[in-house]
Amino acid sequence: MPELSVELRMLAYSALICILLWLPYILARTQAWGLAATAGYPDDPAPLPAWALRSIRAHANWVENLAPFAALVLLAHVGGISNEMTALGARLFFWGQAVRTVVHIAGVPWIRTGAFLVSWIGMVLIFFQVLGY
């Protein structure tokens, strides 16, 4: 089996984080509401801790950004475009999002925004390579 490119590997790791990131806030819901209420639709649920609410938003950010990142990586792959810039872009996206997730859930301001900017720059780098700039 051929080895995945850096870009596809970063996409796979990104998908894995997105797939797993619902677990922290579901565990928080289960702890705060109990299993039955978590599985159902409670009318008046107990408030969740602030970190759990931030975890929901961090997960939503992954969901929102995974689609354009995947589109760019797959366009590059189908177009046979894999070079130092696309690899750098994929790494910047993944590690920027990973750092953003941790500091977002921890409630650290400013670093979260900077980390998001790093991940956005990663997507822009891939975009320019796909279009041949």
Image (tube, rainbow, N blue to C red):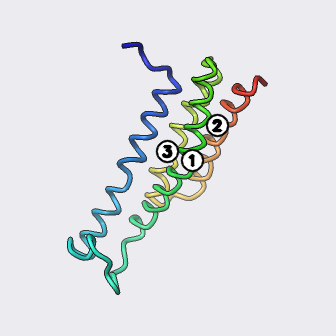
Q: Secondary structure at mark 2?
A: helix
Q: Is residue 1 left or right of residue 60?
A: left
Q: Is residue 126 left or right of residue 28?
A: right
Going from the N terminus, do you reach mark 1 or mark 2 first? 1
Q: Residue furthest right?
A: 133
Q: Nearer the viewer, residue 68 or 92?
A: 68
Q: Quadrant of the N terminus?
A: top left
Percent coordinates x, y for residue 83 in the rendering: 62, 17
Q: Nearer the viewer, residue 30 or 80?
A: 80
Which residue is painted at 64% across and 42% down in the image?
Answer: 120
Q: Residue furthest front?
A: 78
Q: Quadrant of the C terminus?
A: top right
Q: Residue furthest bottom?
A: 44
Percent coordinates x, y for residue 79 in the rendering: 64, 21
Residue on which the image places disc 2 = 123
The Cα–Cα distance between marks 1 and 2, rounded to whole angstroms, is 9 Å
Residue on which the image places disc 1 = 65
Which residue is painted at 69% across and 36% down in the image?
Answer: 124
In the displayed structure, would residue 11 be above or below residue 42? above
Q: Secondary structure at mark 3?
A: helix
Residue on which the image places disc 3 = 99
Q: Secondary structure at mark 1?
A: helix
Asked if the residue at tag 2 contacts the one at tag 3, i.e. Cβ–Cβ closer than 8 Å, the answer is no
Which residue is painted at 53% across and 26% down in the image?
Answer: 7
Of the residues tagged 3 and 2, which is closer to the observer?
2
Percent coordinates x, y for residue 74 in the rendering: 57, 30
Asked if the residue at tag 2 contacts the one at tag 1, i.e. Cβ–Cβ closer than 8 Å, the answer is yes
Going from the N terminus, do you reach mark 1 or mark 3 first? 1
